[in-house]
Image (cartoon, grey):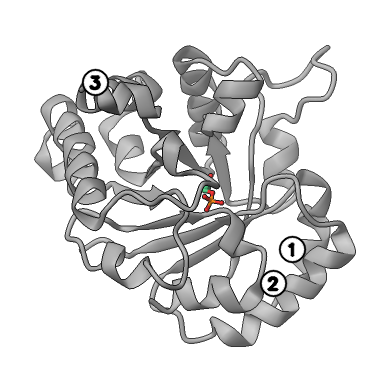
Amino acid sequence: MRTPIIAGNWKMNKTPAEATELIQALKPLVKDAKCTVVVCVPALCVHAAKQAVRGSKIKVGVQNMHWEPKGAYTGELSAEMVKACGVDYVIVGHSERRQYFGETDETVNKRALAVVHAGMTPIICVGERKEQREAGYTDDLVAYQTLTALTGMTPDEVKKVVIAYEPVWAIGTGLTATDEQANETIGVIRAAIARKYGKRVADKVRIQYGGSMNPKNASGLMAQPEIDGGLIGGASLKAEDFSKVVNF
Ligand code: 13P
């Protein structure tokens, strides 16, 4: 059995003081959560977030990380830095990074490997754009994105990663994939992992849905057999909304 994982992706929102406030409000609301709860905060909020989550099971993540161990990479963060701050999860390859910051499947792979080798868990994002779904490419595309991101990992490492299936057309738009669409595409991702690493490995990998997931649609999505959690954007910025998704 896979333990569900609900992660908030705060994107470029919240100061450290606001992060403290949000997490303090969230703590009592998710204290009986049956799933792994993660908040992926802006890197500058990690310190505040780590202090705020004390006494709870909430884990802290960041939203990106570089693959090189150190050097002249202005503006970037290394695995060692991120790990030293007590971070457990790193989002890798979010579609906004692919769209606005030139992220490719190859750089997603490098980042994911660096996260894994540092002993943290990558949340690897894959998903199709609207025109790709309409053209019928979704299954091939998400399988390719997933297997490329995992290249170079051992089967034991693959077992521990988290994949987030986020159809680009559903992000921040209020449009959600239907429960069946999300379940089917996540099934395609799991089948691709099974073909390469075996069913035993694929059955361990937690695969989230992301894209306008909210308190209203969370229980339907989470009832699907292939869906192991959610990566929540907008609805993770309010303690009450996020807690309702966590307590689906
Ligand atoms: P929304 O929940 O705001 O659609 O964002 C989803 C997302 O991109 C999470 O990474």
Observer-nearest residue: 145 or 162?
145
Q: Label 2 is placed on what type of residue?
A: Val
Residue labelled with disc 1:
50
Relative height, residue 85 to residue 33 (above, below): above
Q: Is residue 229 left or right of residue 84?
A: left
How far is mark 3 from mark 2, CA to CA? 41 Å
Residue occupying image coordinates x 26% and y 61% = 2
Tell me where residue 145 appears, x and y as whole percent. Answer: 35, 23
- Within the image, what quadrant is residue 147 found in? top left
CB under 8 Å between discs 1 and 3: no
Query: Does 70 sit above or below residue 236?
Result: above
Q: Is residue 49 left or right of residue 225?
A: right
CA–CA distance between discs 1 and 3? 41 Å
Viewer-nearest of discs 3 and 2: 3
Q: Residue at x 65, y 51 (%)?
A: 87
* Quarter where residue 1 is shown: bottom left
Callout 1: few (<14), some (14-19), or many (20+) C-alpha neighbours within 10 Å?
Answer: some
Residue at the (71%, 81%) spot, across then down = 25
Q: Which mark is residue 53?
A: 2
* Residue 137 numbered tag: 3
183 w.r.t. 33: above or below: above
Disc 2 to disc 1, C-alpha distance = 5 Å
Is 52 above or below relative to 40? below
Amino acid type, mark 3: Tyr
